Image (cartoon, rainbow, N blue to C red):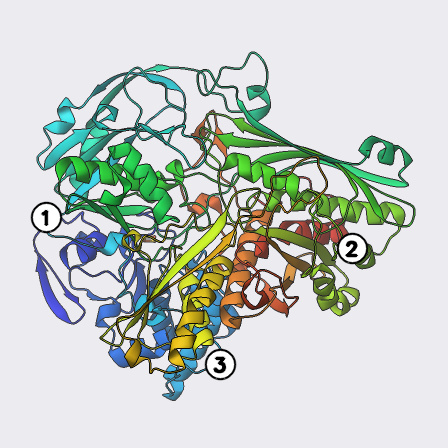
Amino acid sequence: MITFTLNGKSICYDGDPSVTLLDYLRDEQGIISVKDGCSGQAVCGACMVEIDGKPRLSCVTKLGKLNGTSILTLEGIPLSVLTVIASAFVKKGAVQCGFCTPGFIMRTKILFQENPNPTRAEIAAALRQNLCRCTGYVKIIDAVELALYNLRTGEISEIDDAGYLPRYKALQTACGRLPFVNDMNKEGLLHAALRFSEHPRARVVKIDSSKAEKVPGVIKIFTADDIPGDHKTGLIQKDWPLMIGVNEITHYIGDVLAGIVALDRKTARKAATLIEIEYEILPPVTDPFKALQHDSPLVHDGQPNLLEQCIVRHGNTDNEFSQAAFVAEGNFTTQRIEHGFLEPESALAEPEGEGLKLFSQGQGVYVDRKQIATLLSIPEDRIRIQQVQTGGAFGGKEDLTVQGHCCLFAWLLQKPVKLTLSREESIRMHPKRHPVSMEMKLACDAKGKLIALKLIATGDTGAYASVGTKVMERIAGHASGAYFVPNVDLISKTVYTNNIPSGAMRGFGVNQVTFAIESLVDELCEKGGFDRWQFRYDNALDAGLSTATGQKLDKGVGVKQTLMAVKADFYNEKYAGLACGIKNTGVGNGMTDESYVKIHFHHSGKITISHGWSEMGQGVHTMAINIFCRETGLPPENIEVVVDTADRLVTGMTTSSRATALMGNAIIDACTSVRSDLKHKTPEQLAGNVYYGKFICDWTTQPSDNNNHQITHFAYGYATQMVILNDSGKIKKVIAAHDVGKLLNRQLFEGQIEGAVHMGLGYALTEDLPMKDGQLVSEKLRDCRILRSDEMPEVEVRVVEVADPVGPYGAKGIGEIGLVPTAAAVANAFYLFDKIRRYKLPMLRD
Ligand code: FES
Ligand code: FES
């Protein structure tokens, strides 16, 4: 018998002493403020609790060790203390996706006991065990400072009106009361697990489930034979099988061979290990250059390993190079990057009427619905998907992962089923940021005007197409960066291998190519003796000039203004690495970007805004309310935001920094009628009214050799970042000047950029996910080397507003551009310090 106190209540436990405290709290006590972010890897801090006054990770604490202890979760903290800390997190904008926040709040409470008046450095050191992928820790440290001040002084920080709305449902999220998918429960809920392939390329000879079936609690084991409809899904190409069947060949180690449904998750996972698979092992294709050789095995039978080659050419590049005054060139390579969203993939599906209802944390409920319908071979309208707050995504939740399997199992069993990946499985399964090799050559004339650019980029897109071709198209399309280069010869190749697929990740190819071009810009400056700031200013894109794809920019080009925003600091600092960036808003390239909204005034007084974009921490729901209130003058209280396919507001993927721009315009459209009705009616008199709005951009074109009338994207964002080193060569500060078009919510904007800079610094310095022979070198999140709170330098965000002609009120997308210039600015700063040019990321990995 183990006895302990939990949140002031005495507990006598006589079960298995090897059960972790995290599982006990979540499964047996129904406590959801403790999150499972890393499945016992002891790396994320999302499961943090207080044990006898000390911070402890509940995921690695066994119940057998807890006899006589006193345990606290957020549910047991006096409300007065919890409110002070959580309010400070909300007030300071420290809550983005919020998956990490309860862990940080717990750590703050314990820090107050240990050291009630710490310095910022001491706070950063105390938070070291807690990982956040969204905020860059800046606002979290601000929040801890404020919370401790308030606890010391007894003041309560009200959530004040600073001209922007606090994040939607931030307080519930911070306190751990807003359930994520894995926190949800249903009557009779069954639990699923997946069995993954052990080999990146192997023929499956036999799947023997007999031992697994005998495990008590196992309900059913499914294989590819059980899929009623199409076996394959895919965002662009349908090449990704939900499960690999007998006699079929695996394509990577994240391929699923079987699914197990059991009474509980532990049983399902145990049974998954007992399925015996017989393979005929085949040599994997793991090097994209070897994959392009004529004698390479094919990753997909009957399809070349070169999935796509994108070519963009204008002018006479060879001629310009032959006459150039200065030429810089280099071979640059970038690494595979794990998204590291704190919430691993999770889905819960249950029968509803004649169909299914899915609770999802994916990035596109309508796109998911379409794919699931083809798997199950039922009409789309029999599947309803409700988006649940997503614990970070960054592009890594665009492809269908657990949602398809979960729906299949729930559909075939006609029972509610939940499927949540462990951290190891998450790293193994979802697509990553592309590793890319880039041969680049850049030329300017004697006066420092850029005249020509050449690029051959080769991207390892891994086992499945995902959106890899689009990522590589962005590399070509953004190759000239934030500059006008009249002659370009750009080739980007998307190559299949048996590595983990590469797909969407924040920056979508532009980070990679910006590292190359901005490094060469500095090289040209050195060769020609040009001033690095002035050279950039003189070559910067401006109204009337064209991007690499030949799109002539009209209004709203803010590169020069972002350069002006850092000019004084640049000339004052000894080691100031500079880089500019451009990033498209919207998918574009000939595809339609569209958004539909529905605004419903209920008889209860509540107003719901329905749209189709996923809230994953970036603040799209907050922006929906922000824009609605601005348009109508109505207060934000009693407004709810809903993303549910039952509303039939068909929307694409929440991607390419486009959600706020498209949704904002759709809300403005709907509000025209609301405003008109409000002229002669009170809001109460609008009860029962439903207003629809839409915004459709169908005027973009595919990049081509034709230089005329191209609009490859409806908008772009622009930035300049400066990385400043101290006299020892360490990064002391990053200044990020960003053209947002129109600032709608300063706190959300700063939070996005600070988080992106953190991600960009990790990309530049330490992050990697290496593979060898098609296998991961490590499945540990710790080995991805995401920067910790005490590894972050100071980050200063500066706002530049050059109105965009399309975005709502002139606003531009900001989700991705925050890390586009970062790696290059770091590389350029390091070069100033030690005169070593870096061609490979990451630059400081041990
Ligand atoms: S779940 Fe415990 S440290 Fe991540
Ligand atoms: S807010 Fe910290 S991980 Fe999302």
Q: Relative to 223, is 466 above or below? A: below
The structure residue drawn at horizontal position 43% and vertical position 45%, both measured from the top left corner, is 396
**Label 1, on which residue?**
188
- Which quarter of the frame holds ligand 2? bottom left
As drawn, the label of residue 162 is 3
Looking at the image, residue 373 sits to the left or right of residue 837; the answer is left
Label 3 or label 2, whichever comes before in sequence order? 3
The structure residue drawn at horizontal position 71% and vertical position 68%, both measured from the top left corner, is 565
Identified by mark 3, the residue type is Ala
Label 3 or label 1, whichever comes before in sequence order? 3
The structure residue drawn at horizontal position 17% and vertical position 66%, both measured from the top left corner, is 6
- Mark 2 sits near ligand 2, with its Cβ under 8 Å away: no
Q: Position of residue 278 (x, y in %)?
A: 27, 17
Find the distance from the CA under tag 3 to the CA under tag 1.
Answer: 46 Å
The structure residue drawn at horizontal position 34% and vertical position 25%, both measured from the top left corner, is 198
| Quarter of the image where one finds residue 620 | bottom left
Find the distance from the CA under tag 2 to the CA under tag 1.
Answer: 62 Å
Looking at the image, residue 196 sits to the left or right of residue 549; the answer is left
For the residues labelled 3 and 2, say whether their Cβ atoms are less than 8 Å apart. Answer: no
Quarter of the image where the N terminus is located: bottom left
Q: Relative to 713, is 615 above or below? A: below
**Label 2, on which residue?**
536
Identified by mark 1, the residue type is Gly
| Quarter of the image where one finds residue 710 | top right
Q: Residues within 10 Å of mark 3 (few under 14, many from 20)?
A: few
